[in-house]
Image (cartoon, coloured by chain):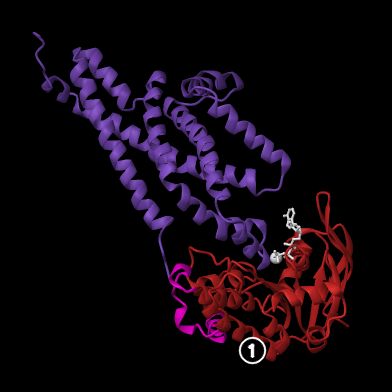
Amino acid sequence: MSLIEIRDLHKRFGAVEVLKGIDLDIAAGEVVAIIGKSGSGKSTLLRCMNGLESHEAGSITVGGKVLLQDEEHLRALRLEVGMVFQQFNLFPHLTAGRNVMLSPMVVKGLAEAEAKPIAEKVLARVGLAEKFGSFPDQLSGGQQQRVAIARALAMNPKALLCDEITSALDPELVNEVLAVVKSLAADGMTLAMVTHEMRFARDVCDRVLFMHQGRIHESGRPEDVFASPKTPELQQFLGALS
Amino acid sequence: MAYQFDFVDVFKYTDVLARGVGLTVTLIGVGGTIGIAVGIAGAWARGYSGNRALEWLVAGYVEAIRNTPFLVQLFFIFYGLPSLGVRLTEVQAALLAMVVNLGAYATEIIRAGIEAVPRGQREAGASLAMTRMQVFRHVVLRPALQKIWPALSSQLVIVMFGSAVCSQIAAEELTYAANFIQSRNFRAFEVYFVATGLYLVLALLLRQGMRSLGGWLVFGRRA
Ligand SMILES: Nc1ncnc2c1ncn2[C@@H]1O[C@H](COP(=O)(O)OP(=O)(O)OP(=O)(O)O)[C@@H](O)[C@H]1O
Ligand SMILES: [Mg+2]
């Protein structure tokens, strides 16, 4: 059984239908890249998978539990599925360590003494053990994003959703973040990531989804999708990149 | 210009002035603290409760207070409420009026601060499985207060000046004390000169106090 099952998902903003029937299965441990033009609905799909956007029709099932829109179900979903954002979204008034400890403490009710070793562990996992006491504005963009990944990991999610997590970074900081993602993938984390890093998608991902006008237009193993795209839309999209 | 200044005649009443200052400080200390708490609760209710009825209730409260004179609010509480069986002393009525008044303005100020917190912060909190209440308390509140702390401090000073109006119901705060002394010694210039100076000092102290409190509570960076 898949960890995440999406069936005929529809989402609209006002009159505009942004997702027009998405079917998607993601197995535990699978690493999926989502690519596509701006406005094709990539972020919306990811946000629906975390319940940050509601959907009008279709279903999202995580670990066998259907996502409903009340707070109770949303929170249960978010305990299983973490999210990392393009803009990091660290809490500016808290240190890196406190950013990571906050949710284990307030959501899971851990004591400070229990949350601290968890935070130390996940910060070490992203190579930032020594930044525990630094505030976000004292960290580089790449470091902030790694703290954001650590913060999501601290909740011990089954899957991680990443929405263009390197797009706001200076080019020289991209690799340190991608290296972390790569190591998570190697450790068996389930990942769905919207990305423009085609080389990374090719090297690390198990599957590539190409979104076009609110649909998964083409998908497959990265070596096939990149080497021999079938649809003219994907050919054009990849052609425009190179 | 035959007028002879005589401040000695004012300083004879130092104890009266001291009591007036004491009550003014108490009013703004207690009323300010509770009023800001009301403001936080009001801002939460308007932006975070997710309860339409509560949102409307708070919106009505804020608009009612912001669009009526403080003096009338005070009279309503002191002279009006007894008709409903709520009988308050002068000081209680003054305090309640100040809390109700500041609460409304603070609600609006703090709400503006909350709206200035980027949506991404709230979404990050939500994506970490926090409840709306937890997001409000742990993610939004402190950055929001940071953004509006100077405005809130100014509002507090305004409310302290507003407390002068409470002399009208014979709450014996600083202005009441000045009026009282003036009615005894007819030294209007001297009395109100001293009272003005005292308000100035109180206002400066209040601003400094808010700066220190903010530095500790709101801007404080604890590792
Ligand atoms: N909150 C919103 N309200 C209204 N329309 C929205 C909202 N969010 C997204 N949209 C619209 O939905 C469509 C899909 O947006 P989405 O952000 O999912 O695209 P995307 O594929 O992530 O694009 P990008 O590569 O630019 O991030 C766009 O047309 C966008 O304008
Ligand atoms: Mg996007």
At 55% across and 83% down in the image, what residue appears? A176
**As drawn, B75 above or below A5:** above
Q: How many marks?
A: 1
> Which of the chains is purple?
B
Q: Quadrant location of residue B108? A: top right
Query: Is A124 rendered above or below residue A170?
Result: below
Q: Is residue B108 magenta?
A: no
Whole-percent x and y of residue A87?
Answer: 59, 66
Q: Main secondary structure of the magenta part?
A: helix
Q: Is residue B157 left or right of residue A77?
A: left
Q: Nearer the viewer, residue A177 or B105?
A: A177
Q: Is residue B117 above or below residue A197?
A: above
Q: Quadrant of ligand 2?
A: bottom right
Q: Which residues are magenta?
A: A117-140
Residue A207 location in percent, x, y?
80, 84
Query: Picture coordinates of residue B75 (x, y %)?
Result: 49, 19
Which color was chain A given? Answer: red
Q: Chain of mark 1?
A: A
Of the 4 image quadrants, the one containing the C terminus of chain A is bottom right
Q: Residue furthest bottom?
A: A186
